[in-house]
Image (cartoon, helix red, strand yellow):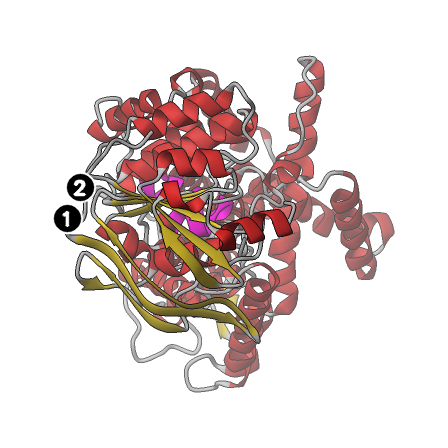
Amino acid sequence: MAEPFDFSQAPEALVLTGVSRRFGALKAVSDVTLTIRQGERRAILGPNGAGKTTLFNTICGDYPPTAGQITFFGTDITRLRVHRRARLGIGRTYQSSLLFSGLSVLENLYLAVRAASAGRFSLRKAGPADPDVARARELAGRVRVSGFLDTRIDAISHGQRRQVEIGMALAGNPKLLMLDEPAAGLSAAERPELIALLAGLPRELTLVLIEHDMDVALSNADMVTVMKDGLVVVEAPPAQIADDPVVQSIYLGDPH
Amino acid sequence: MIMMSTRQWALTGLGVAILMVLPLLLHNFWLVNIMGRAMVYGVVALSLTFLAHYGGFISLAQTMVAGIAGYAVAMMAPTAIPLSTMAMPYALAIPLAVLAATLAGALVGLIAVNTREIYLLMITLALAVGFSLFAQSNITWFRGYEGIRNIVGPEVFGLPFRTPMVFYYSALIVAVLMYLLVLYVVRTPFGLVLQAIRDSNRRTAAIGFNVALHRIAAFALAGFIAGWGGVLITFYNIGITPSSIGLWATVAVLIMAVIGGLGHPLGAFIGALIYALMDTFASTIIGHDRFNTLIGLVFLSIVLLSPDGVWGIGERLKATLQGKGSKPAVEEAAGNETADRGS
């Protein structure tokens, strides 16, 4: 699905150098070094417990690395707080939908737009002419939830929530979009919607995707990183991944 | 974005209108010791409900913050016994006292900025108990166990503040303004961010909001609201003592907020009214030393039968009458944030 794109000359978007994350005695992510260039579509594969989501959490700052360094377009973000990283242009979705369930679809998207604007902290009520509201509506159209603007998040379907997730991650015009299993739990009818959405993303946007489904992952990626037990075990273009003996042993040895 | 509906505005207007003409119908005792008292304590409970319902922060420090405004106004009051060296007119003392409560609220928010749920409850309770013990033992400023007396409040249009009409209408104006302030703020971007933090603080940070800053601001606003309540409570009691901000006072405000219902700002006032009624009439029913038993039983039955309080009972009755079975707000709000650990 990914069109040929020469990103080898593109600037380095995200560089991880020896990144580790410990939880007590557990080393969830172990000495990961990788470079992702601007515009690259990178898929991260691996069995459950491989450390994929923890790797995301070290990058977005929910659980900063316990060792190593992360730079984002040349800026060291290793110790930066979560909201600071978001403002630099890192957008992400979560594996389990952590949306604002007591608020409406429009309010969720509006807040995501607002967070990226100058008027982040405001005691002025948004009027109908507020450009941020207009932008939130436009986002809703982009992620195909325009029909549910005033519906509370806990009243829409799982698939629609995943679309709102992506809309919120896109609201700040991120330079890097990290999607954590965007296809998980989607029905057969919802899957094409998601794939169309991903295909429609601007080419200069850097995309990192965690995906269990090898077909979805491989069709969307320029490059694939395979993790196991917190370590990067393979890094290769999609064409070489399916035949890689290590990948085969992981996926065949662990019938997951 | 979502405005109060026309119907809600009409109901609010009707309610305020009834409260405005109430002095024509009620005996002064009811006006001051039931309605007035319910409104001034209701304002403190409102600050707790605001934090709990919209931010998800259950703070037990709201009585303490109200007490800081109460002590501040007492220390600066021109009528205080004993009079302090910094006595000044009420017109100056009242805003300064509210400012002190706002700052105290922000400080509580700062101290508790990284704590949630039971830990937030514990840290705010510790602050509240610590402060009341400090006030009890400090003679120089807080006048120890005796407290500060004769805080009669300012004269309004030449009438003493203790005149039933003056006290009632002052309490009504403050209560309505604070109630409308909460309704307004929760629809602003700031208020929406608070609700976002309640639903998922991780996501709120991930889209770029400074969660800590918003939390501190929420506690400061709650301090501002509680401060107005604290000033009026001090005028109502004609003074302030450490026991009026101690553990029992703290628990009383929590009971008001829970009985009334944490699901809506109005619940705070409903709860404060029920508390005032029971506190006043318990003695005629079962004897005054049984008040704690009575209020405890009411509290227990509310928590067991209708966790979202009297307000929740009303909402469910409404839903039943309209033929829609809606679930109580508390159930919906519970357990939204699921763990999201390493894959």
**Quadrant location of the N terminus of chain B in the rendered image:** top left
Q: Tell me if residue B152 can be seen.
A: no
For disc 1, the marked residue is A10
For disc 2, the marked residue is A6
Q: Residues within 10 Å of mark 1 (few under 14, many from 20)?
A: few
Let me know if marks 2 and 1 both belong to one chain: yes
Q: Tell me if residue B135 can be seen.
A: yes
Distance in Å between CA atoms under marks 2 and 1 = 8 Å
Q: Are marks 2 and 1 in contact (CB under 8 Å)?
A: yes
Q: Nearer the viewer, residue A158 or B333?
A: A158
Q: Tell me the element at label 1.
A: loop
Q: Give residue B311's quadrant in the image.
A: top right
Residue at 30 percent across and 36 percent down: it is: A170
Left or right: residue A244 compared with residue A87: right
In this view, B210 is above or below A122: below
Between circles 2 and 1, the one closer to the viewer is 2
Left or right: residue B213 compared with residue A175: right
Q: Give residue B270's quadrant in the image.
A: top right
Left or right: residue A204 compared with residue B108: left
Decide whether the magenta segment is chiefly helix, strand or loop: helix
What span is colored magenta in the figure?
B185-205
Q: What is the x, y in percent for residue B259? A: 68, 44
Q: Tell me the element at label 2.
A: loop
In this view, A239 is above or below B343: above
Residue B187 counted in the magenta span:
yes
Q: Residues within 10 Å of mark 2 (few under 14, many from 20)?
A: few
